[in-house]
Image: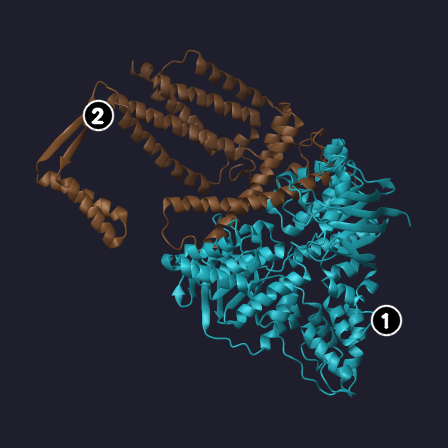
Chain colours: A brown, B cyan
């Protein structure tokens, strides 16, 4: 065997550090990324700092300042990072689709629960008067009778409640019958849905800001590999046992995920989907998964322990670095400076671009 | 020859948390392994083989956290490795290594490069030296093609055989003088098995390393080992070179050791090679050909193999036409499968790992949904959601590892679990639970926690839990992988009984002996396509087909193929029973004219 077959003379060109022939993607914490993804070229510490500091500014812009223009600019930067993360296009699209409902509900809750007065009121709708009333009315026995009747007939509760409520609403709006108010007590405060130009601006800014942060976080998680994390922790001089513990945890998690998949399938094979199930039954099914999961973990952990001991691992023994840490390069210094600027903007003076632009 | 390992009067029992002490796991073990030799250890499950390996390495008793006062109650005897006593530090020195059974559990890091370097990093060796050693080790196990990109290759990108060879390489890089291999091939498919066996052969031939090989497969044991020990219930019952080891019929049968087919034929007929059972095909030919060549023998009638038995095969129960399946990432697992299952047959589904056989079986059980094509189970189209939901009532799926499918803390609850899901009322449920426990012989464990049953019992429980739901078709995924001879026979008899009751059974397996003995029909998958459909006899006589699919016929069938050159009229014998009948009547024909079995 030639003595130099295993390595090449130039640093950084070693065959074992090159991508395997024909492979374009490498596994990371979340799915996989392109091996040559641009964002992944940065050092993990630089990437993490950038994402944290940018999120800090973003949070300030959407919460304290309500700066739509500033948040929009950062959103564009986040989107660029997301696109440079080397995520598989199909999975990226899927994730975008998954974040949509979250963003829509964020927008809706912000509009409903934050009646901010602005210069233009677009909608004003009082929904709660601020007190509860105890009323005796005709629709009440009617409602009860329908629910009970329905249950006795079909053995289903929800259908009865739905039908009874519908009938009750129809009765009160079409055929007003006398009702007696027994008591009235104050509870909470009156609620009004108020949509103004101001509340709309706040809601849109929030959606833009949070979606930007989602992009950044996905980009960070998709680009990071566990080997890289171990190296970064080593460079930060975290004690060896902790680093080693973490690396074993990642491997064990990987194994547990594949166990979970099989156990879930075994549950389907035992007719878990045969009949419609209540929420409580579904929770109990999840609980049942714990039994084989724990059994597998116990059996695996004893073997993993043996394997570690057989390789000579002892808690007190240090171990040397071997292509785990990545070098800190000029680009990482630049990113570090950019991150520091963002950090300064988070706590120092920050111009509100939207206000400046409107002036 | 200097000794590598000496064990003298070794006793060990595991500590308990209650007052009652555990029984001894190892009882008075004494052995001596010479340097550069290969020492085999075999024995049924639960005999203490893995525990013995752990003591050889010093993991037991030194990592069991016993106080000096407790130690004599759990550990007695002495162990020496290369002339020095085994201590807590022994496993940390790189003189001894141990490769475990499950390739997953011993892959400790997330890339091939770091997995190989782990032990060397702990030793604090320089980077240059680590690189040199791990590259060498990778070449020794024949995986040098993984060197390019080793930092990016994740354990999930490797096959089981490759993972096991990486584990061996990780120890070779540490340059140990003694290597323990604890059932290194039992979790692997035939291709992976052969890869690992060839690696072990190379270690023996080129590096004269001392190897301790724990193994069930008699063929591997007799090929590689200088001496074999039989362990049963913590005691060594027999130590002998392979040639003598397999002559000890009484001992081996009494303690349930796995014995090769050629040895079993020899035991039952009395034909031997140099006054001992033949171990290779060459020896078998020399032992069994002469009586068959004797033309004065009358033509004998031999019991047909399982596939020709009078099992009333009925109407089609599963009809799959043009089934395709692709995974989320777009890879095609199945490419147009057409297959029909008939009521009452036992069908073997063969093929290398990743050939799509498990995917297909999971589609039949409604766990996956076919991407396209049509699958009808008992006449119903399983593409319909409602049909698929109720499918577990007609197609049962038993997973390979019983630990993945036991959800309850009580054996009887486990059986009732699926019944509850199917909505069967309590009284009927109790009836079924009692009957099922009776059928699999687990009644006395009804209130036990499944976790505390033995592996064989857990597997019977897993079959029972699926069986209780009353399926007509039973899919069983590798029921015999990594099991000893008695467990294999136990589980196969259970499946045969079910077949007698009219159930259709589909077995996914790599075990060719099982195929020859029990299955009526064989289907082989390759790259997501159907490569072969026919009877086991047709499969085993088609050498091209076998080679293409990476399958190896059982020794019985291989012997038939070999003897065909000198005995063209020889019937296609594929089971031990057939060979025994042919040879037995040949031997007894002149005086008795009776069949022996």
Residue B477 position in % (x across, y down): 56, 59
Protein chain holding label 1: B
Q: Which residue has dot 1 on it?
A: B274
Mark 2 — on which chain does it sit?
Answer: A
* Residue under the image location 51 percent in, 50 percent down: B407
- Depth order, front residue of A263/A202: A263
In the rendering, at what x and y percent does residue B488 appear? 64, 62
Q: Which quarter of the figure has residue A95? A: top left
- The x and y percentages for residue B261 are 72, 68
Few, some or many residues within 10 Å of mark 1 (<14, 14–19, 20+): few
Q: Which mark is residue A192?
A: 2
Residue lying at the far top of the rendered structure: A349
Graded by Cα atoms within 10 Å as few (under 14), some (14 to 19) or many (20 or more), the crowding at tag 2 reads some
Residue in the foreground of this view, choosing between B22 and B468? B22
Q: Nearer the viewer, residue B126 or A328?
A: B126
At x 58% / y 43%, what residue is drawn? Answer: A297
Same chain? Circles 2 and 1? no
Side of B272 where B405 appears, left or right: left
Question: How far across and how far down the image is residue B133, in percent?
Answer: 76, 39
Tell me where residue A108 sits by quadrant: top left
Front-most of residues B50 and B224 = B50
């Amino acid at each position: 065997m030639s003595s130099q077959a295993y390595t090449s003379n130039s640093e950084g060109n070693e065959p074992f550090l090159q991508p395997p022939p024909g492979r374009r993607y490498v596994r990371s914490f979340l799915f996989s990324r392109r091996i040559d993804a641009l964002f992944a070229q940065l050092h993990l510490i630089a990437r993490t700092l950038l994402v944290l500091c940018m999120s800090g500014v973003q949070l300030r812009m959407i919460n304290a300042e309500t700066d739509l223009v500033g948040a929009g600019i950062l959103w564009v930067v986040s989107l660029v990072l997301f696109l440079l993360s080397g995520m598989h296009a199909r999975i990226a699209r899927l994730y975008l689709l998954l974040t949509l409902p979250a963003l829509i509900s964020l927008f809706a809750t912000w509009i409903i629960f934050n009646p901010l007065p602005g210069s233009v009121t677009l909608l004003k709708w009082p929904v709660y008067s601020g007190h509860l009333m105890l009323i005796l009315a005709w629709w009440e026995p009617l409602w009860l009778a329908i629910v009970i009747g329905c249950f006795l007939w079909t053995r289903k509760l929800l259908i009865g409640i739905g039908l009874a409520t519908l009938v009750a609403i129809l009765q009160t709006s079409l055929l007003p019958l006398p009702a007696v108010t027994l008591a009235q007590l104050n509870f909470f405060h009156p609620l009004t849905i108020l949509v103004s130009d101001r509340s709309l601006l706040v809601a849109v800014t929030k959606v833009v800001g949070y979606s930007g942060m989602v992009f950044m976080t996905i980009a960070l998680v998709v680009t990071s590999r566990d080997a890289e994390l171990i190296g970064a922790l080593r460079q930060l001089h975290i004690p060896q046992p902790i680093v080693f513990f973490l690396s074993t945890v990642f491997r064990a998690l990987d194994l547990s995920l594949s166990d979970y998949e099989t156990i879930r399938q075994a549950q389907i094979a035992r007719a878990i989907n045969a009949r419609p199930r209540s929420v409580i039954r579904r929770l109990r099914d999840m609980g049942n998964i714990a039994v084989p999961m724990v059994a597998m973990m116990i059996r695996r952990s004893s073997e993993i322990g043996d394997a570690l001991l057989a390789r000579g691992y002892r808690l007190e023994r240090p171990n040397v670095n071997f292509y785990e840490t990545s070098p800190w390069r000029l680009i990482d210094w630049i990113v570090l400076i950019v991150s520091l600027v963002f950090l300064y903007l988070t706590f120092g003076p920050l111009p509100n671009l939207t206000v400046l632009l409107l002036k | 020859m200097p000794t590598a390992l000496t064990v003298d009067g070794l006793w060990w029992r595991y500590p308990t948390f209650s007052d009652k002490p555990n029984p001894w796991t190892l009882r008075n073990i004494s052995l001596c392994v010479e340097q550069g030799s290969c020492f085999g250890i075999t024995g049924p499950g639960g005999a203490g083989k893995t525990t013995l390996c752990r003591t050889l390495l010093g993991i037991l008793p030194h990592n069991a956290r016993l106080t000096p006062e407790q130690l004599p109650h759990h550990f007695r005897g002495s162990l020496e490795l290369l002339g020095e006593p085994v201590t807590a530090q022994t496993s940390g020195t790189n003189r001894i290594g141990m490769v475990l059974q499950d390739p997953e559990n011993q892959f400790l890091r997330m890339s091939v490069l770091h997995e190989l370097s782990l032990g060397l990093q702990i030793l604090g060796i320089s980077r240059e030296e680590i690189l040199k050693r791990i590259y060498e080790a990778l070449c020794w196990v024949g995986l040098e093609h993984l060197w390019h990109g080793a930092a990016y290759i994740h354990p999930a990108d490797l096959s089981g055989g490759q993972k096991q060879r990486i584990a061996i390489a990780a120890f070779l890089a540490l340059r140990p003088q003694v290597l323990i291999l604890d059932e290194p091939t039992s979790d692997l498919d035939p291709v992976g098995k052969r890869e690992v066996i060839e690696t072990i052969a190379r270690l023996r031939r080129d590096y004269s390393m001392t190897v301790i090989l724990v193994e069930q497969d008699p063929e591997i044991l007799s090929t590689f080992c200088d001496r074999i020990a039989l362990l049963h219930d913590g005691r060594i019952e027999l130590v002998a070179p392979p040639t003598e080891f397999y002559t000890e019929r009484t001992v081996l049968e009494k303690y349930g050791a796995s014995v090769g087919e050629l040895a079993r034929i020899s035991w039952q007929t009395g034909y031997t090679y140099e006054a001992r059972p033949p171990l290779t095909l060459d020896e078998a030919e020399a032992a069994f050909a002469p009586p068959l060549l004797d033309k004065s023998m009358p033509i004998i009638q031999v019991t047909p193999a399982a596939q020709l038995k009078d099992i009333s095969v009925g109407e089609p129960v599963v009809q799959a036409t043009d089934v395709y399946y692709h995974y989320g990432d777009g890879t095609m697992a199945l490419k147009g499968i057409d297959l029909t299952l008939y009521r009452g047959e036992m069908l073997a589904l063969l093929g290398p790992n990743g050939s799509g056989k498990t995917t297909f079986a999971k589609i039949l059980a409604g766990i996956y949904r076919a991407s396209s094509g049509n699958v009808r189970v008992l006449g119903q189209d399983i593409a319909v959601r409602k049909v698929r939901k109720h499918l577990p009532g007609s197609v049962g799926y038993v997973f390979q590892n019983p630990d993945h499918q036991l959800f309850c803390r009580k054996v009887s609850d486990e059986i009732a679990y699926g019944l509850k899901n199917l909505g069967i009322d309590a009284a009927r449920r109790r009836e079924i639970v009692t009957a099922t426990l009776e059928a699999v012989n687990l009644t006395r464990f009804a209130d036990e926690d499944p976790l505390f049953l033995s592996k064989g019992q857990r597997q019977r429980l897993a079959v029972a839990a699926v069986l209780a739901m009353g399926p007509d078709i039973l899919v069983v995924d590798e029921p015999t992988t990594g099991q000893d001879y008695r467990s294999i026979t136990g589980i196969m008899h259970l499946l045969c009984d079910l077949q007698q009751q009219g159930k259709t059974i589909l077995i996914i397996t790599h075990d060719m002996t099982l195929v020859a003995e029990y299955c009526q029909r064989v289907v082989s998958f390759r790259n997501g396509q159907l490569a072969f459909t026919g009877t086991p006899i047709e499969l085993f006589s088609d050498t091209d087909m076998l080679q293409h699919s990476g399958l190896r016929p059982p020794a019985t069938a291989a012997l038939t193929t070999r003897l065909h050159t000198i005995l063209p009229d020889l019937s296609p014998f594929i089971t031990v029973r057939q060979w025994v009948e042919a040879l037995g009547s040949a031997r007894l024909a002149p005086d008795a004219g009776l069949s022996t079995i």
